[in-house]
Image: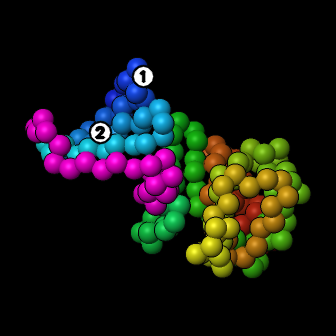
Amino acid sequence: MSLVREAELPGLGKKFEVALENGDKVVVVIHDDGTREVYHFPEDEDEPSGQFVFSDQEARRIGSIISGAYYEPKALEKLETAIADLRIEWLRVKENSPINGKSIGDLALRKNFGINVISVIDDKCRNKTEACRINPGPGFLFSPGQMIIVAGNTEKMKQFKKDMFQPGG
């Protein structure tokens, strides 16, 4: 796992230094005005080999792409991220899923399962602004083809998947 160092830059913003597994280093400076600077340092080099400057919106879009919000590689279809007991999973709503046609509020996902819906990606709207709903509200309805990104602890996630993604479950 990569080591991340964080440093305050008074009057400027914050700096994050990430040591990569191959020995290289990436430094990200987030300015108070929202711009980001990204530097790549090859292993054992003091000068960056490349630099990018992004606006706040560009950085968020690129971050979403890198994190997999726009495309989920087939090899990572069952991606599960565990931090302590936190799990983040990608689940596809199918025609026969018990979650299909119900709203977040109707299902009381937080109360009944301890699950938070982080985002919903709708394949039918892939190139439109509504393709990705971040933190949808209680009235949001699930429908077939949607990919939902949910977070919860291990046990509650297992129960949620069993009850909401297996027909008759």
Work out whether residue 56 can be spotted: yes
Instruction: Between residue 113 and residue 15, name the one nearer to us.
Output: 15
Q: Nearer the viewer, residue 91 or 105?
A: 105
Q: Name which of mark 2 and mark 1 comes first in the sequence.
A: 1
Amino acid type for the residue under numbered disc 1: Gly
**Start-end of magenta stretch:** 44-66
> Which numbered circle lies on residue 135?
none
In the depicted structure, whether residue 62 falls above or below residue 72: above
Q: Which residue shows up at 81% across the image and 57% down it?
A: 104
In this view of the protein, which residue sits in the foreground, 152 or 36?
36
Give the mark count: 2
Where disc 1 sits, the SS reads: loop
Res 101 → quadrant: bottom right
Q: Residue 137 magenta-drawn?
A: no
Q: Secondary structure at mark 2?
A: strand
Look at label 2 and name its amino acid. Val
**Marker disc for residue 11:** 1
Spot occupied by residue 70 in the image (x, y as percentages of width and height): 51, 66
